[in-house]
Image (spheres, coloured by chain):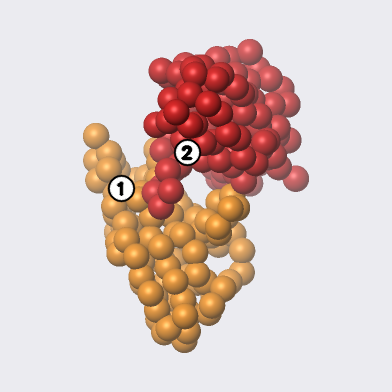
Chain colours: A orange, B red
């Protein structure tokens, strides 16, 4: 069966510091991978998606970037965090189109 | 523009009191409509996928239905463990990839 991992689970970072969040998927090959951010009381906002190694598309311009160095690894990064980057970050994988996206446990990021 | 609206924002039920959650959507060609359950501090858990008007899916006390403009999540005789936020999302054929558009969710609280 497929599993998806995210780490760290919680992160507190000062403004201006760098960020690296990691997501890995097991039990599937060549998945579509997604990064979402969820603000309190709001819906999920798609940040980045990837259909393959090295292929990244951005949904909205922002202070973040993403990379996919391996088939089942997806990384979310920032060179300098802003207060507005605080939120709950979720990684998701998808196999065949239309069969749904499956989410990881999430990373709670607090920028102070 | 693809859009999803969920109502009510919050719902409080007594244990055993059945009710329905609504998800209204507009999308350019529906590939699928998805229901998720999200517990506090956790990633969304996949519940159902619906593909065409008239389709129904059931899982324990939950039943999801779909029309051309909306979906309902019916909860029959709920228990306190059904308390969670329920998210609805649609996936259309536009955009060249499998983007999910999420609603803001319905927070359900079931009291003994």
Element class at badge 2: strand
Q: Chain of mark 2?
A: B
Vertical placement of A98 versus B59: above or below?
below
Q: Are discs 2 and 1 located on one and the same chain?
A: no
Q: Nearer the viewer, residue B71 or A73?
A: B71
Vertical placement of A54 versus B43: above or below?
below
Q: Which residue is labeled 2 in the image?
A: B84
Element class at badge 1: strand
Vertical placement of A46 versus B109: above or below?
below
Q: Nearer the viewer, residue A46 or A44?
A: A44
Is residue A5 in view from this perspective?
A: yes
Quarter of the image where the C terminus of chain B is located? top left
Query: Residue B28 at what x, y percent from top left?
Result: 71, 36
Horizontal side of residue A94 vs A39, given as left or right: left
Query: Residue B84 at what x, y percent from top left?
Result: 47, 38
Q: Quadrant of residue A6?
A: bottom left
Mark number for residue B17? Answer: none
Query: Residue B29 at what x, y percent from top left?
Result: 68, 31
For label 2, the crowd category at 10 Å Cα-Cα, with few meaning under 14, some 14 to 19 and many 20 or more, is some
For label 1, the crowd category at 10 Å Cα-Cα, with few meaning under 14, some 14 to 19 and many 20 or more, is some
Q: Chain of mark 1?
A: A
Q: Nearer the viewer, residue A89 or A72?
A: A89
Q: Which residue is labeled 1 in the image?
A: A4
Cα separation between marks 2 and 1: 21 Å
């Amino acid at each position: 069966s497929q599993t998806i991992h995210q780490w760290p689970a919680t992160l507190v970072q000062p403004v201006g510091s760098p960020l690296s969040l990691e997501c890995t998927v097991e039990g599937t090959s060549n998945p579509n991978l997604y990064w979402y951010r969820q603000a309190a009381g709001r819906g999920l906002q798609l940040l980045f998606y990837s259909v393959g190694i090295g292929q990244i598309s951005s949904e909205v311009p922002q202070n973040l970037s993403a990379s996919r160095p391996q088939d089942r690894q997806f990384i979310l990064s920032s060179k300098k965090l802003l207060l507005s980057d605080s939120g709950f970050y979720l990684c998701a994988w998808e196999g065949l189109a239309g069969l749904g996206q499956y989410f990881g446990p999430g990373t709670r990021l607090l920028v102070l | 523009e693809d859009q999803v609206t969920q109502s009510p924002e919050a719902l409080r039920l007594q244990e055993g009191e059945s009710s329905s959650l609504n998800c209204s959507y507009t999308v350019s060609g529906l590939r699928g409509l998805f229901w998720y359950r999200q517990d506090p501090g956790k990633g969304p858990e996949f519940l159902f996928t619906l593909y065409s008007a008239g389709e129904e899916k059931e899982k324990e006390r939950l039943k999801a239905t779909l029309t051309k403009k909306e979906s309902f999540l019916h909860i029959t005789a709920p228990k306190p463990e059904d308390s969670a936020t329920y998210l609805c999302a649609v996936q259309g054929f536009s955009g060249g990839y499998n983007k999910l558009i999420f609603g803001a969710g319905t927070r359900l609280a079931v009291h003994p």
